[in-house]
């Protein structure tokens, strides 16, 4: 095992003289299914002059309660832990007057984020994507002022500069939005053509204001069509103004995407606008995954709700509370194995399978699902969203057959014997097993925690389990 200590791009210290260590497993839930905690590690080594200078001497640097140091713990060329050292989190013990040891109590980048987020506010706009907003909140916590800090650059940015492995840029790309449809809506407005309406005004008569508005189906996809044709005309003195606009939106559940548009204008009565034809067979109702209907100037939707851009109350919020709210809404967790934040689904049936044939031990115990979480809906304009998600959560595990807690133990030298039906490479780092679904004895196991004991080589897989059914969720 090797301990590395970095500050930015500079390697300040490394040692293989590890006296003692303890590293938390990778977990998607704490004691309560709905919560998540920072990962911790303790590691003891000899307190050398180099370390004393870094921690107590001229190289000591503290920002916002943390040493500006990044700690890596590696074993057999595998990174097992990356984290930081809060102030007051090391203990020095004298073995002899000239020989001391030091024990570091480290937390991972998730722990650092949660501590920074507790003292940071984030401005939320009127529309928010509950997953895509999370990297923006993370960036704000690590890059913007904290507690009215007016230093230049902000202190938190100076702390971030000391942590080369820290990243959040692609955090949202690992989330599978298509598997989380926690509730349905009825008569939900997905489009109002007043948002595209031409509000031209001239001090001459308006002689035409034609609106074509409807729904249509093309190649099994669903669309909204809106067009408006305006004409102002005065005979004497002659004046002429003509406008035409159309918009086409593609619909998927409660989400719409603008795919085509055009705006035309003419003030020459001898050169009027050539109006393009609307789609054939515009309808007032269409039926797909849900139902869509024209209601006056709006398109309303009834059916499964996709957590896309949702209406939020524009205001400043505590960043930690926002992270908690949006992760719960999305049934997601923040994972940070190698310094890069990832947002992943707490349970994802699209993860690849690994088949275990000969574990050291295995057990399955019936488990009562946890109580539903209490989602703080302060940021949501429509509280029915959080109410529906709460109800969906309550029966999620039991409705999907996950009524057992499994514990499977294998040895690290058995990793290569695991079988992938998709012929995927087996990870050599045990903690990366969190990204798989396991099959053993006609049970499937969705891991919620991976523990690794380096001394014995034991890898303990703990997860939610049920009788095996192909693609059960």
Image (cartoon, grey):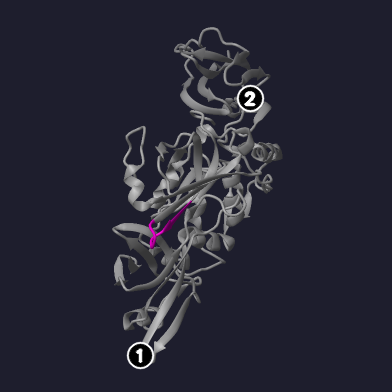
Q: Which residues are magenta?
A: 450-457
Residue 179, x across and y down, in percent: 53, 33
- The residue drawn where x is 46% and y is 61% is 108
Task: Confirm or deny contact between disc 2 and disc 1 (CB under 8 A).
Answer: no
In the rendered view of the protein, which quadrant contains the C terminus? top right
Residue 210, x across and y down, in percent: 60, 14
Residue 370, x across and y down, in percent: 66, 46
Instruction: Let me know if residue 468 is in the magenta part.
Output: no
Between 7 and 370, the residue placed more toward the observer is 370
Between 93 and 136, the residue placed more toward the observer is 93
Q: Which residue, as the protein is rendered here, is positioned at the far bottom?
A: 97
Position above or below: 435 against 83: above
Instruction: Let me know if residue 456 is in the magenta part.
Output: yes
Residue 113, x across and y down, in percent: 51, 59
How far apart marks 2 and 1 lie (CA) works out to 72 Å
Q: Which residue is mark 2?
A: 303
Asked whether residue 460 is in view, the answer is: yes
Between 463 and 213, the residue placed more toward the observer is 463
Q: Secondary structure at mark 1?
A: loop
- On residue 424, the disc is none
- The residue drawn where x is 47% and y is 79% is 91
Which numbered disc, 2 or 1, marks the residue that appears first in the sequence?
1
Q: Which residue is mark 1?
A: 98
- The residue drawn where x is 41% and y is 78% is 102
Which tag is nearer the camera, tag 2 or tag 1? 1
Q: Secondary structure at mark 2?
A: strand
Disc 1 crowd, CA 10 A, few/some/many (<14, 14-19, 20+): few
Does residue 400 appear left or right of residue 81 in this picture? right
């Amino acid at each position: 095992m090797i301990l590395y200590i970095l500050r930015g791009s500079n390697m300040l210290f490394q040692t293989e003289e590890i006296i003692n260590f303890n590293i938390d497993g990778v977990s998607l839930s704490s004691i309560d299914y709905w919560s998540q905690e920072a990962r911790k590690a303790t590691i003891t080594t000899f307190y050398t002059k180099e370390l004393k200078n870094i921690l107590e001497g001229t190289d000591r640097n503290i920002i916002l309660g943390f040493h500006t140091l990044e700690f890596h713990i590696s074993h057999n060329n595998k990174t097992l832990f990356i984290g930081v050292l809060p102030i007051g989190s090391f203990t020095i013990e004298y073995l002899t007057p000239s020989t001391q040891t030091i024990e570091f109590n480290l937390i991972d980048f998730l722990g650092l984020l949660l501590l920074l987020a507790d003292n940071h506010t984030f401005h939320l706009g009127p529309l928010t994507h509950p997953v895509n907003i999370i990297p923006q909140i993370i960036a704000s916590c690590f890059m913007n002022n904290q507690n009215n800090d007016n230093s230049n650059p902000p202190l938190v940015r100076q702390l971030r500069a000391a942590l080369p492995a820290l990243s959040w840029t692609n955090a949202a790309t690992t989330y599978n939005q298509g598997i989380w449809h926690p509730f349905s809506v009825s008569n939900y407005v997905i489009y109002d053509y007043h948002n595209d309406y031409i509000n031209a005004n001239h001090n001459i008569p308006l002689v035409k204001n034609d609106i074509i508005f409807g729904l249509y189906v093309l190649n099994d996809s669903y669309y909204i069509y809106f067009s408006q044709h305006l004409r102002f005309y005065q005979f004497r003195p002659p004046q002429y103004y003509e406008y035409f606009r159309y918009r086409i939106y593609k619909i998927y559940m409660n989400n719409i995407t603008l795919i085509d548009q055009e705006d035309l204008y003419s003030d020459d009565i001898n050169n009027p606008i050539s109006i393009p034809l609307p789609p054939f067979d515009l309808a007032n109702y269409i039926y797909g995954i849900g139902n869509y209907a024209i209601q006056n100037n709006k398109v309303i939707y009834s059916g499964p709700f996709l957590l896309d851009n949702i209406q939020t109350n524009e205001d400043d919020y505590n960043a930690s509370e926002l992270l908690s709210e949006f992760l719960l809404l999305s049934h997601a967790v923040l994972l940070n194995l190698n310094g890069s934040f990832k947002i992943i689904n707490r349970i994802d049936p699209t993860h690849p399978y690994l088949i275990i044939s000969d574990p050291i031990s295995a057990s399955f115990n019936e488990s009562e699902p946890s109580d539903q979480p209490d989602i703080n809906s302060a940021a949501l304009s429509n509280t029915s969203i959080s109410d529906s998600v709460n109800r969906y959560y309550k029966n999620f595990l039991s409705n999907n057959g996950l009524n057992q807690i499994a514990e499977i133990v294998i040895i690290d030298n058995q990793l290569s014997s695991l079988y992938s039906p998709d012929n995927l490479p087996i990870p050599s780092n045990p903690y990366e097993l969190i990204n798989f679904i396991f099959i053993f004895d006609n049970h499937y196991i969705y891991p919620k925690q991976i523990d690794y004991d380096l001394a014995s080589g034991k890898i303990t897989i703990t997860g939610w389990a049920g009788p095996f059914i192909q693609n059960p969720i």
